[in-house]
Amino acid sequence: MKKPIITDNIIEIPSSEDFLPDVDNFIEGKLESYGLNRSDIADIAISVTELVTNGIVHANKLILEKTVKVEISKKNSEIEITITDQGDGFDPDSIENPIENENLLKEVGRGVFIVKSLMDKVVFDSQPGKGTTVTMTKHF
Amino acid sequence: MKLTDSEKDGIAILEPKGKIMGGPDATLLHDKLHELIEGGKKRVIIDLAKVEWMNSTGLGILISSLTTLRNNQGELKLANVTDKIQSLLTITKLVTVFEAFDSVDDAVKSF
């Protein structure tokens, strides 16, 4: 795959950060059409770009043939987003706490912490060799 | 993200615009900062007035900028931090790391 594929509520991108703006435009467009306010849109867009970046860089290791898929849906006043990569899986509990003093000046390692802070519910389904699917929800 | 730069009282002012989410954004700011340091400009303000939001990659860029400048006997200060970014700085405790001011003028006076 050399460019994003968009079908209704799904965008699937090759593993390059160059496609992050495509994901952001897709997600923000959907959220605007659902009538969310700018603050909620920003919280969700930040969270999506965090997890898509993790999928592109850490899971798929920037291999363009591997993809990251983002699916969005709205049920009543709840937004649900799933993000799926094709990496080797990981243990989300193994991530260091970024707000410990010794980690404050590290340039990386805050993504999952921020997502958990901004979204109402975040569930990781990660198995060795089967990639990771993150499902997150936010009420609005 | 777009990036413009200016200077006031010998202090470099960088003004990113848009969203800072990684990829080319990181390279752009990193390259500009090193250009400033090589040109002897080590006192820098990043004016965030026109940045709607950033993710952890953006925060990483700010930290990298701060440490790079300090390692070169320089300093970084922030100005016009928007509500969403202030919230992220609070959540991540980076409010304790960065010096932030309500205006570029206030930031300039603080050097």
Image (cartoon, rainbow, N blue to C red):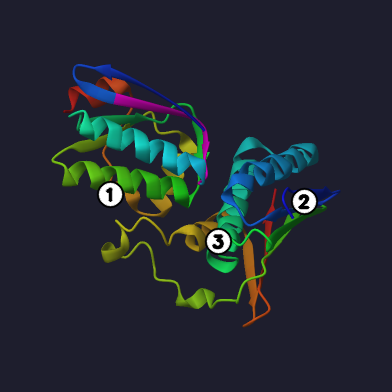
> Mark 3 highlights which residue?
A54
Side (left or right) of A79 relative to A107: right
Disc 1 crowd rating (10 Å Cα; few below 14, some 14-19, many 20+) is: few
Indicate which disc, 3 or 2, sits on the residue closer to the N terminus: 3
Q: Is residue B79 above or below residue A24?
A: above
Q: Is residue B11 above or below residue B89?
A: above
Q: Which residues are magenta?
A: B13-22
Rendering coords of residue A26 (x, y %): 73, 43
Rendering coords of residue B6 (x, y %): 32, 19
Disc 3 crowd rating (10 Å Cα; few below 14, some 14-19, many 20+) is: some
Q: Which mark is residue B96?
A: 1
**Quadrant (top left, top right, bottom left, bottom right) of the N terminus of chain A:** bottom right
User: Within the magenta stretch, is there residue B17?
Assistant: yes
Pointer 2 and pointer 1 on the same chain = no
**Which residue is depicted at the point 77% across and 42% down?**
A30
Q: Is residue B100 visible?
A: no
**Which residue is depicted at the point 69% across and 61% down?**
A67
**3 or 2: mark nearer the eye:** 3
